[in-house]
Amino acid sequence: MTEYLTLIYLKVDPRGKVVGCKQRHRNRRFNEVGARLVADGLPRGGHAADRHLAFAWSEILDDENGDIARQIFKRDRAGPPEKAQTLPAYPALMQNRKMTFIGLIWAALAPLILVALIIALAWWLRRARAPGAFLWAMAVVLLPVAAVWWWDRAEFIAACTGEGKPVIFRKAMAEGVFLNSGTSNSFGMRYLQQEGFLWIEAPSIYQRDAWVRYERSGGTGYGDNIKTSEIPAITARYEVREDSSEPFGHTSLSQTKIIDRISGEVLAKAGSAHFNGGRMKWVLGAWGTRSCPSAMSSPEDFDNYYHLAKKTLR
């Protein structure tokens, strides 16, 4: 089974308010490394609300804080003020697309570096008339790579074991939620488009200690218009809290909790870990990455993690 990445394109009006979005699906593993290159190319700085907007899955969001939201919401004011514009048309995002393309090529073809090393070493050993030149070349090149990768992967296994399976302690019903996440204004739109919520409330990306409500203005399919309005305070009873951290050098951890804001009770929790390939990522590319839960090895856990809010509150 192939893991897929959900890409969300937003439409904003000249004031920067979200008025619509659409989604596209891509093969997840080969987009991870490309997305990382996009984040590396964006300016550093900004606060936590700008974090991880270059990625669609929280388990791969392990770069430093980047002022990505400012890049995404950069607008061309020369156009008609009443006309909403589609974000991917902007030069900054076009440049990031090129970087993503380069990242995807490298992610898929990085192991060819090892193949080239094996061929070169085998050729040299044959010239030296060494017996079993090709087998020796494979051992010399691949064994150290495998050993280092396996050693670095141990931290990922520890993170997966410590996090455990997604757990729902108690279910409830809610038409909307408070989404406490650094990607609430972008990839958080999936809670309206995929999870079935009528509205979500979230921190404003423009002002600290300010709040915004996103509402689905009609229909249930992708591409629905989204109405954005400022609100004086949070009204949702239930909070979807998404946190990201890097407990290890090569492994990022994302955790989601569903919390009753009145009682403080945790209704459900789930976590996801992503291993970037460790020190061998430069020669393994996407082939050295691992995630848990995985749609390939544990599809049920993967589904429960990704749709935790829906399964708990809808």
Image (cartoon, helix red, strand yellow):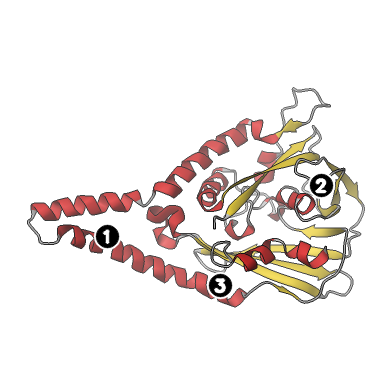
Q: Residue at x 19, y 54 (%)?
A: 121
Q: Amino acid at mark 3?
A: Ala
- Mark 2 crowdedness (10 Å alpha carbons): few <14, some 14-19, many ≥20: some
**Residue 265 pos. (x, y %):** 82, 75
- Mark 3 crowdedness (10 Å alpha carbons): few <14, some 14-19, many ≥20: many
Name the residue carrying label 2. Answer: 220
Q: Amino acid at mark 2?
A: Thr
Closer to viewer: mark 1 or mark 2: 2
Q: Secondary structure at mark 1?
A: helix
Q: Amino acid at mark 1?
A: Val
User: Residue 235 or 142: which is nearer the viewer?
Assistant: 142
Distance from label 2 to label 3 (Cα)? 36 Å
Q: Residue at x 64, y 67 (%)?
A: 300
Residue 138 located left or right of residue 293: left
Q: Residue at x 63, y 68 (%)?
A: 301
Name the residue carrying label 3. Answer: 159
Residue 183: in sight, yes or no? yes
**Residue 15 pos. (x, y %):** 81, 35
Q: Secondary structure at mark 3?
A: helix
Residue 164 located left or right of residue 157: right
**Residue 243 pos. (x, y %):** 68, 63
* Quarter of the image that includes the N terminus: bottom right
Distance from label 1 to label 2 (Cα)? 53 Å
Name the residue carrying label 1. Answer: 141
